Each structure stands twice: as structure tokens, then as C-alpha cells.
Amino acid sequence: MGCGVAKSNKFHTKKGGKAMKAAVLIQRWYRQYVARMEMRRRYTWNIFQSIEYSGEQAQIKLYNFLGYLMDNFNPTSTERNLISHIFRENEVCRDTEWERHFCYKNIEVPEIYSGPRLIFPLTVEQVAAMVEAFRNKRQLHSRYVLQLLLETWKLLRKLPNISRISTCHSKEITVCGDLHGQLEDLLLIFYKNGMPSLDRPYVFNGDFVDRGKDSIEILLILFAFLLVYPNDVHLNRGNHEDHIVNLRYGFTKEVLGKYKMHGKRILKLLQKIFSWLPLATVIDQKVLILHGGISNTTDLCLIARVDRHKYVSALRPPKKRTQYPVSQSSVDLDMEDDLSGTKNNQRRVSLIKANSFGPRDGFQRRSLQDFSGRVPRTVDEEIEVRRRQSGFIKGGFSHSQGELNNLAVSSASQESTDTADTTVEEWKQILDLLWSDPMSQNGCIPNEVRGGGCYWGPDVTQDFLDRHNMQLIIRSHECKQDGYEFCHNRRVLTLFSASNYYEVGSNRGAYVKLGPDLVPYLIQYQASSMTRELTLRKNVGKVEHSALKVLREQLFAHKSDLVSAFQEFDKDKTGQVSLNDWATAVESVLRLGLPWRMLRFQLATCKTPGGMLDYQEWFQELSIKEPQMEHIDQGLLETLYRHRATLETIFRIVDLDNSGFITMEDFRQTWKLLSAFLKMEITDEAISDLSVTIDTNQDGNIDIDEFMEAFRLTDKKSRLERGKSMFMGTTTDLTKLEGDPNI
Amino acid sequence: MAPKKKEEPKEAPKPKAPEPEPVKIPEFNPTEVVLEFTPEQIEDFKDAFQLFDRTPLNEMKITYGQCGDVIRALGQNPTNAEITYVLGKPKAEEMATKMLDFDSFLPIHQHICKAKDRGTYEDFVEGLRVFDKLGDGTVMGAELRHVLASLGEKMKEDEVEQLMTNQEDANGCVNYEDFVKHVMAS
């Protein structure tokens, strides 16, 4: 160092010895500080991630449950009719019908509209102007949205399932991971890296929508660039490019909020567009890019051959078409459905084998087979059956996974037709591709945490790469603290481009550049500049605070179960438990796999002198109380709170015309659905109490948003809640558009 | 800083050396350590250990390199030299590859916990006062950074940066009592 000589002499004196000692002291304390921060960061991360994944799991469970209703309920049952429309995947079939849907020509754009006006075919200047407009919080008029979507659809239909690109014509290819509606991150990437162009090709690896508040803007930007540079912009489908997932995670709500008049149409078209998104991209035949990952059965040749657009939602296999000719004009089986309910019922049931409840054979089909049976049931009967089955089903998954996969294949082959065989196999391939996660141990097991796809190990990676003569897999799907992470001996790269995903300061985003040498060059960023100025402690503290808040809510939502668990440890009914027992009980109820002992100082602060915890008092601290709710049964409130995301999802499904309102009668039916799903009793009286509280103008309609807010089920301040279960605090952002019927 | 002196030196120091001959310390012997932790404490340690465990099957093992982190996360503040000592002076590459299971970790942790010279708030402040040229309760941030990066168990530039963020005032001075509180608080 500069002034070295004099100083080093100084440090040989006694004073120097002291300086040395001081330095070492500071250094040791600093290292302790860092280690403690790291520990807090890790458990905070665990909290967010386990809650996120358990939410995804809940969504899949809900969807499976609804699927079961569809397949097994009396076709005339009201419950089934409430939800049947979400399973109508191809509502209109003929080209003319679709054109009507896409028809933008009759939509007038008023003079007063100040957003971008597009003229097709698009030029790059227009797209750049549109990006700028979005940066300035303008919104694109629905006319142009529809037109842009139409053009996008036309283009996507021509693309193969696997895009094959090369680096030889350009310098470097940029690959981006999940964006999740976070426009700032996309803008930041463009700022740092430049926008897509002939010299600057991009691959976007799925999950463009949901959770963030600007999902539609991100889509419009990506589609626009795709139209302008069709050979240099490549999009891969993610698991969130799926209308069922969108119902829960915010995209549906965002579009309906921003486009009040034409939102529903836009969403319908997006369903189609999502199904036409390519599934993977390959660079120089050596680097595979896809959203989720692979499994031990992933076969690129098969994937290249599938009719990808059949899989409108990856959560549900396509219908068997054996009774109808398979033709290019895609005969609409769903429309036939509505005409002849009985036929439909029969056909649906034939997709599901009537299994005895032996061990689950086939993870991906478990969802459908859980409740197989041919007898149509009413909801009440259903509740009974599920109660009986629940014990069995929970314990069912005990066989070795390899066996199960084999069984899946063999059970598939017992299907009566080849069409069904291929369909199931294809579906599994796509599900794996979109939902899987890597794990560190060898093998391939079903991904129970997410509820779809699998966990695959380094041996599977190696085998796959050898078989296909490739060297690297780039995938996304998982949030990483540094925006990226290598695993499997650096043969798998996880890339995540939504910074501050869980909370401001939680993680960085990253993108990767690959030149002809195919050596990945990673760039990281973080959208909020605020975080750079915070000390490490403040940064970690902020994120931790957020995580703990969410965790407290989870604890509150499980109050009755927790009290029972505590009472197991408190046989003498003292009302107290030791902190150890507290930790054990909490884990047994919440099952989040978190280090509760480490968290106890933040979560359970009221301690008696003896170090025991008074648990009733503790719940007082946690509780969310609303004075006017006191006449409502506390148990019911707790249920509402715990399952609020599911409740809202069901509401939105039931709200057929996406008006934001449902009738009182439908409201009651919704509750019956929910009680069947949750396997619990909700009395008519309780439902009346709820509806009376809400329907303040007594007109027989319930405003969904108001309902959710009235029961304090939404928390606008929490960023985590925003988008996580469609509770996006964006109503204030949209107020300027509220009154504009023209957008 | 020389490793902690545990016992009498085995050899008498040579008379002509200006500094005392470094004493021969016997290797760390984990079997000689008496574990005094309570079962509760051990449960706590397990939680922390698990948080750093990255093995595929959650085998309750960490790398040698992580051992220091876990011990520090649990509230101790050993020097790197002390950590190296209790690990049996592993080679540099072993730090990333050699694994430590929980049972082997306990005596190591116990030994560190028993260390007397932890450094109190006063020690810390005294140490920093060395750099307080004007005697006004502040030290020059630049000098502190230099010292941390070049003396003792040197810190890397980004570590220094992280530590010093928002500690210096407009004149580049650090109030060291506040600084100590900042570092010692957790």
C-alpha cells in the first residue's frame, strides 16, 4: 500500500503490536457478524421458499380437486356447472370463430388516448417507443393489444417445438430467466445489455407473467420484439404460461383490472398463445435451454414431435380423442361436451381407470386417479368419501419411485387405445420440462413439493447430455439469491432474472451471455438501488422482517391445530409449553421444514420466568382481529384466512363473466365447493352470516374484492402478498384508468 | 496473531532472538475435550448446523471451510488461526472437500467456546483508540480500511467495503464507539 514503509516500521513498536491486536479483534468480530447475517439470510430464504412451494402445491391440489369434480359429478349438478367452463379449453374451434375473437378492427381508439399507437407490420422504432411508454406507466390500448396478439399467434404457429439457433452469425446470445411481471428488471436488462436486435439475439426462458404487476407489459414487449426480429428473439414456455396457474398467481386479475372491457377476450387469446409457445431452445446443438428441467425419460425427439398446442394447461392432460376423428381443423370436443352431458361424462371417466386404492401408480396421474370412480356423486356424498379416503391417500406414497414410474408407463399401456398412450407419455414429457427441479443426489423422483414434474440428479444430467451430445442445460424456475446457480458439476445452470423477488433486497437477478465458445458469462443486477446503500444488517433485516410476518400469518391461520398440538405436550393443562416442545409442535402442524428453534426468539417472545411459553397469550399477540367480525365463528375465520388464496381462486373461477361479482346463490355454492375440498363442515348458517356482512346493499351480489378485503384477508402493504395470491395492491396504480372504458 | 498458548513451551527460547521462539503447540485432540453443553444447546447447534448442511441427503455434514461460519453463527468469534488449529491444520484444498459431521463438530465448538480471550467492548474500543490520532473519539476511515486489509488476518477489499458502509461521516471519519457497537450487535 502507498504509505507502507513508514507504517510498517510503526507496527514493530509496542504501539504496532496494539494495532495488530486491534485489527485482529475487528476482523474476528466482522467474521462473526457476517456468519450471523448469513445464517439469518438462509433461514429467511427457507421461509419464503417453503411457503411459496406449499402455495403451488395447494394450487395443484385445488385444480386436481376441481378436475375430479368435473369427472365424477352428476353432469347436471350445480357445483359442476359452476366450474366446468375452465375446462373448456377450446371453446371456439373454427378459424372464423377465432378471428372474431381476435377482431380488433371494430375497437375504436379515442383521440384522448395518449399511449402508443401501433401500425403493423411493426418496426423496431415503434417497439422502442412502446417500451418507453411502458416505462412511463402508459398502457397499450386493447385494440393494439389484440392486434399484436393476433400477429404473435400467427407467427408462433409456424415455429417448431424446439428452436434451434447458432452463435456463428452473431457475437453473443443473451439468455434471461424468470421475469414474473417485474418490468423494472426487464428494463434494467435492456439498459445494461441493449435491446434485442439482429446483432443481439435473446432467449427468454419462460415465466414472464404472474406475481409482479406488469405481466401484460412484459408479454407485449417480448411479443413485439419477436415480431420484429423473429429469427433473433426466442421464447420458451414456462409453467406460469398457463391459464390455470394465472388464476391464482395474479396475471388473470392484472389483465382484468387493466382491461375492463376486453380483458376476458385478451385472456382467452393468451391461453391459445401460451399453448403455442415453443418448449425449448438449443444453441449450436450443444446447449439446451428450457424452463423447468428434465427427467430420466426426457426425450427431445419426442418433444420435437408433439402437438404442443394441445396442452393448453400443463396441469391437465388433453382429452382423449378416440371417439372423434382427429383432424387438422381440431374438432371441438368441448363444445360437443356441452351438448351431450352424458356422453361427456362417459368419455371423461374412461380416461381414468377405475383403480382400487392400491399404492399410487404414477405420480403424474395420481392427481386424476386419487378419486377415481364411476359413480357420480353429490357434494355431500363427496365429503363423506373424502373423509374416509384421506387417511389412506396421505399414507399412500411409499413405494420406490422407480417402481412408480414404471407402473405409470405400464398402467398407461393398459389404456384401450394407442392415442391415450402417447398422450399420457407426451404429457409427462411436457410436465417434466416445465416443472422439474434439480437435486444433488442421483436418481429421479417425483417433485412432491411443487406437485408437478420431478427432481432429477447429476447422473440423469450426465446421461441426458451424453445421449444428446450436449454440454450444458440452462433452466430457470427457481429463485436464486445471486440470480444464478450452477449445479451438477457445472453442467446445469439455473438462471433467474427477477431481482428482489421475495422482498426488496432478497436476491439479485442475472442473465447470461454465450459466444461461439459457449462459455457462460453471467451478469448480475438488482433493480432497486436502495439496497446498495443499506448495510448488510439492514438489508438482511428487511427481508427477514417480511418473511417473519408471513410466517406469523401462517401460524395464526393454523391456530386450532397448533393449540391441539401444544395440548399434547401440556397434559397438565398449565397453558404453557417449553420452547423445545413449541418448536416440535409447530413443525408437526405446519410442516415447512424450518429451523424453528432458531426462529423462536423472533416468533415467540412472551416467556414466563421459567422459560416456558404461555401459548394462549402467544396467540393473542399473533391474532388478526376485526371488531365487526366477532359474531362470526372464529374457526370459520381461521379457515378463511388459511385458505384465502384458494377461496379467491374459486371465486374467480365461479365469476363466469369476470365481472368481479358473483350472485348470492353462487356464493353459497362456492362455499359448498370449498367445504368439500377442505373436507370440513361449513353450515348454511355460517355462510349466511358471512354474506350478510358483505352484501351491504342487499342486491344479491357479492363483490369479490370487497369480501376478501373485509375479512382482512388481504394486506396491501405486504409485497409478498401482492401477486402471491392475487392480492396485488395495484388498485391505486390503476385509479387513473378506472374511469376509462375505452382502454 | 500467534495461536493460543495452551501449555508451557517445550523448549526454552533461544537467547539471541529478538522475539520469543514460537512455542510448540500440541495438535488439537478432540477426544480430550469435555463436552459441557446442555441438551438444549445441542439442539440449537443442530439447527444451525443443518442450515449450513448442503449434502444431498441432509447427512448432517458440513465442509471444513464452513466450520468457522457455523461456530461464528452460533455466537463465537474465533480467529481464522484458531479455526485452522481445531480442524487439525488442514491443507487449503481440504477446506472445500473434507467433511465434518455433527459429532466431530461438538468438541471443536466446545474448545472455541471455552476460549477466554473473547474481546470485550472495552478491548475493542481500546484497540481502535490506537488509531485515534486526535484523541477525539474518531479514526480516519481510510486508515482503518488500510489496517483491516493489510494487518492481522487480512480482509478482502469487498469485505472491508461491506463493513465500512455508512460508517464514515462527511469527513471520512468514523466514530469508533458507534462502530464497535455496530460490529458487536447482532
Image (cartoon, rainbow, N blue to C red):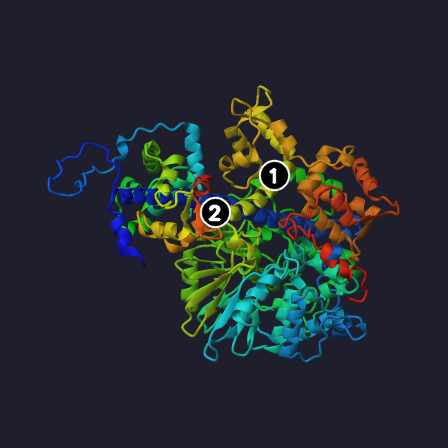
Residue A428 numbered mark, or none: none
Q: Residue A138: where, in percent of width, then height? A: 71, 66
Residues behind callouts 2 and 1 on a single chain? yes
Residue A552 numbered mark, or none: 1
Res. A307 image quadrant: bottom right
Q: Is residue A22 depicted above or below A212 in this figure?
A: above
Q: Residue A364: where, in percent of width, then height? A: 57, 54
For image coordinates 77% across by 55% down, the residue present is A342
Let me know if residue A10 appears in the view.
Answer: yes
Q: Secondary structure at mark 1?
A: helix
A257 with respect to A209 (left or right): right
Dot 1: few (<14), some (14–19), or many (≥20) neighbours within 10 Å?
Answer: some
Mark 2 or mark 1: name the one nearer the start of the chain.
2
Q: Residue B69: where, in percent of width, then height? A: 39, 44
Let me know if residue B60 appears in the view.
Answer: no
Q: Residue A59: where, in percent of width, then height? A: 64, 50
Res. A429 image quadrant: bottom right
Number of marks in picture: 2
Tell me the amino acid under the disc marked 2: Ser
A303 with respect to B174 (left or right): right
**Which residue, as the protein is rendered here, is positioned at the far left?**
B15
Q: Which residue is mark 2?
A: A400
Tell me the amino acid under the disc marked 1: Arg
A674 vs B126, nearest the viewer = B126
Dot 2: few (<14), some (14–19), or many (≥20) neighbours within 10 Å?
Answer: few
The chain ID associated with circle 2 is A
Q: Secondary structure at mark 2?
A: loop
Task: Determine the CA span between mark 2 and mark 1.
Answer: 36 Å
The chain ID associated with circle 1 is A
A429 with respect to B181 (left or right): right
Which quarter shows the N terminus of chain A?
bottom left
